[in-house]
Image (spheres, rainbow, N blue to C red):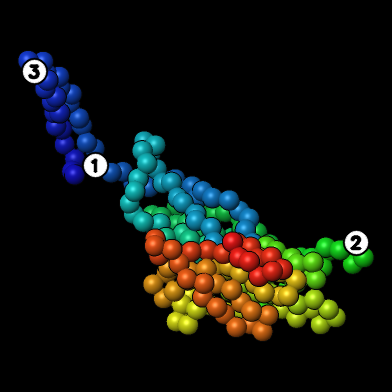
């Protein structure tokens, strides 16, 4: 609480033990070290931490360091040191406290994209849709439908998607529940029906099915209030 000396005493029956504690006033920041990994992909976040010490090597919690990014178009950093990757490239994140600084080079990689592999075409990047930066595929049908999830910067919003087979290879955003938030796809059958779950406005997960025409059907939930669909077969049975 403040500088000074106090005595801590513990008692158990007739026995007692005491220890004297000396509390020193905080020193001045002499060294700053920024901690955290230096690589992440576009759309992801990374928390940097700072350790600052005085001349006696005592760790200090004040003052609060100031963070900055040399190129905020590649990555932005919050006052608390949370880095959000925006574009592929390299930048430097710096933490400054009491005129002392520490920097960490940050490499931002291309966003993660789902792919589809076949013996004839090899690995094909499925890409993404405007507004989203990354895709994750979770299921493929015998007819070539691919189902998965697209995410925005910092994973603040995710939408289920389906990629149609054939020459157009159209990528469709399946959306979510009216007034709700994110949606996630986990299974697809040969008819192009997709299952997964979507969150309500209250953040509750409900199992859903998207028909081949894109119409969303809410499958309901158990007594606990949440549900999730992970697979669908060609007979339309959902688990």
- Residue drawn at 8 percent across, 18 percent down: 13
As drawn, the label of residue 13 is 3
Pointer 2: residues within 10 angstroms few (<14), some, or many (20+)? few
Outermost residue to the front = 235
Horizontal and vertical percent position of residue 184: 58, 68
- 218 over 232 or under it: above or below: below
As drawn, the label of residue 159 is none
* The quarter of the displayed image where residue 8 is located: top left
Which tag is nearer the camera, tag 3 or tag 2? 2
> Is residue 128 among what the camera can see?
no
Q: Nearer the viewer, residue 67 or 16?
A: 16
Do the residues bearing badges 3 and 1 touch, measured as CB atoms within 8 Å? no
As drawn, the label of residue 119 is 2
Is residue 196 rendered to the left or right of residue 222?
right
Q: Which residue is mark 1?
A: 25
Pointer 3: residues within 10 angstroms few (<14), some, or many (20+)? few
Task: Report helix, strand or loop for mark 1.
Answer: loop
Outermost residue to the top = 14
* The quarter of the displayed image where residue 233 is located: bottom right
Q: CA distance from mark 3 to mark 2?
A: 79 Å
* The quarter of the displayed image where residue 232 is located: bottom right
Tell me which numbered mark, 1 or 2, is placed earlier along the sequence: 1
- 179 over 102 or under it: above or below: below
Which tag is nearer the camera, tag 1 or tag 2? 2
Do the residues bearing badges 3 and 2 touch, measured as CB atoms within 8 Å? no
Is residue 91 rendered to the left or right of residue 17?
right
């Amino acid at each position: 609480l403040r500088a000074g000396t106090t005595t801590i005493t513990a008692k158990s029956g007739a026995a007692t033990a005491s220890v004297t504690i000396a509390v020193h006033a905080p020193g001045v920041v002499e060294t700053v070290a920024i901690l955290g990994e230096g690589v992440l992909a576009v759309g992801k976040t990374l928390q940097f931490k700072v350790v600052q010490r005085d001349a006696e090597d005592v760790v200090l919690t004040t003052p609060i360091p100031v963070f900055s990014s040399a190129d905020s178009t590649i990555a932005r950093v919050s006052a608390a040191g949370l880095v959000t990757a925006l574009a592929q490239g390299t930048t430097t994140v710096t933490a400054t406290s009491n005129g002392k600084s520490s920097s960490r080079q940050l490499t931002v990689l291309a966003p993660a994209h789902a792919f589809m592999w076949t013996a004839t075409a090899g690995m094909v990047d499925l890409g993404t849709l405007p507004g989203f930066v990354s895709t994750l595929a979770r299921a493929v049908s015998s007819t070539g439908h691919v189902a998965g999830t697209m995410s925005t910067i910092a994973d603040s919003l995710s939408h289920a998607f389906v990629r149609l087979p054939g020459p157009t290879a159209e990528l469709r955003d399946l959306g979510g529940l009216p007034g709700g938030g994110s949606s996630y796809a986990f299974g697809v059958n040969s008819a192009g029906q997709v299952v997964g779950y979507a969150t309500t406005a209250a953040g509750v997960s409900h199992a859903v099915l998207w028909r081949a025409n894109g119409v969303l059907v809410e499958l309901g939930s158990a007594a606990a209030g949440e549900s999730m669909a992970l697979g669908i077969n060609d007979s339309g049975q959902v688990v």
